[in-house]
Amino acid sequence: MMKIFIVSAFLAAIFLGSADCKNWALIVAGSSGYDNYRHQADICHAYHVLRSHGVAQENIVTMMYDDIAYSEENPYQGNIINQPDGPNVFPGVLIDYKKQDVTPQVFLAVLSGDKEKVQELTGHDGRVIESGPDDHVFVNFADHGGPGLLAFPDSILHAKDLEKTLMTMHKKNQYKKMVLYVEACESGSMFATKLPKDINIYAATASSPNESSYACYFDEKRQTYLGDVFSVNWMQDSDKENLETEILQKQYLITKKETNTSEVEEYGDLSITKMTVAEFQGNQASFVRMPPSPRHPTEDAVPAPEVPMKILEHKLKAATTYNEKRKVAQAITDLMAHYTAVDGLFQSLVGWMEKNSMRWYPAGGMLTFRRELSYKTLAKERRPITQWGCYEQAVDELANSCQNLKLHQDYYALQQLFVLVNLCERGYDGKDVRLALLQAIKDHPRLCAN
């Protein structure tokens, strides 16, 4: 009889996991503003996916600016949907960190379970991920991104800072397995060279290191996009699948197939994909079923950097009076002027690099002037980041010295950061890049006035 009990317990441990294993989740919408409606919609939907599958409310920490549901631009006050004609996903979402508390520093403190740091940063107590060596952690992030960074409402999270936190958590044995789903442009660059394969962490990203993610489901009444293709696809899969039998690899492959607008990628410990989705998103059968969307998310999908202009184009078509049309037309003109100004800033940077900088050729062992730099070439090239110090310091210089640009929430400017990547990768000294950047900023006082 004792042998039967031992065998039964052993099998239960294999198929059900340790009884001491808890599920923890940190879900983050890193943007603000009504044009970014979809990020908060994604995260509200994710919250209900986790709750409906049994993840305890006290084990889910949510970060969201919370300016969408009751925005003056929202014609349906208190209502957020993530798909056409979908249910309101806002009610019931417990938001732990709002407004100015949605920062990279708070995010990393919450993820690493540092209550004292949260208190120091926010001025109040806040819930954190209190996972232990037997626990599974699920992280879902939705927002803007750029090469080697994720954006927050008022600042930037660099890949190295996330890497440092994850490595520290691993050394402290703060989790058993961790899964990250990241929705952002160039999101693959956060992990491609930064996530080791031997620290029990798996990451799936909406895009490769050098391409945009896509927004979807434009709503004519709300005049904004309701979701992001990658996020919508994995959550619609979780809504309908039996998560106790579906493994992460299957969800990844389904999401990758359905997300044909960008290259969904995976990084880290791929052996984790043999585990069930339930082990990270909850192991209860969901009694809350999202109705199927009336259209596929890729039908009207657009690259995230094009969202502001696409929204204005929709508004122009919907305008019924002369004054409305004139107002939207002016907004389009202003946005195009902004794009031109951003191009001018980076063109000026390249010009100053041509005039003043010297490049080190390691093979030849000599310094030489570089005179054939091309802004268009530098903007189009998609080199992988290896010179992290040079690049990240240049990004910080731009963000701090050109604060009016609001780099962290400027789609177009984030795309131009490849100019900085490529200058650093071509061997230019980081100090020279920063000095040229400061000169370019002085050339554009209207864009960069602080």
Image: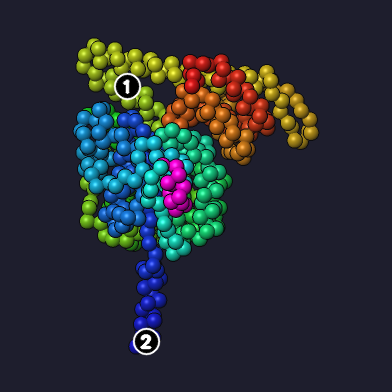
Task: Locate residue 90, reporting x and y percent.
Answer: 25, 42
Amino acid at pointer 1: Glu
Task: Locate residue 391, reporting x and y percent.
Answer: 59, 34
Residue 182: name its quadrant.
top left
Residue placed most toward the observer, 140 or 316: 140
Prevailing secondary structure class for the magenta stretch in the rendered image:
helix
Placement of 187 over or under 237, stated as above or below: above
Residue placed most toward the observer, 354 or 127: 127
Residue at 33% across / 42% down in the picture?
42
The 10 Å Cα crowd at callout 2, few under 14, some 14 to 19, many 20 or more, is: few
Of mark 1 and mark 2, the one earlier in the sequence is: 2
Residue 373: name its quadrant.
top right
Q: Give the number of the disc on residue 2.
A: 2
Distance, label 1 to label 2, CA atoms, is: 72 Å
Task: Locate residue 294, reporting x and y percent.
Answer: 23, 40
The residue segment tinted magenta is 110-122
Please state, as top left, top right, bottom left or bottom right, where the N terminus lies in the image: bottom left
Residue placed most toward the observer, 174 or 414: 174
Placement of 406 over or under 286, stated as above or below: above
Q: Report helix, strand or loop for mark 1.
A: helix
Q: Colour scheme in the image?
A: rainbow
Residue at 22% across / 46% down in the picture?
291
The 10 Å Cα crowd at callout 1, few under 14, some 14 to 19, many 20 or more, is: some
Residue at 36% across / 33% down in the picture?
32
Residue on which the image places disc 1: 313
Residue 261: name its quadrant.
top left
Position of 109 with respect to 33 (left or right) is right
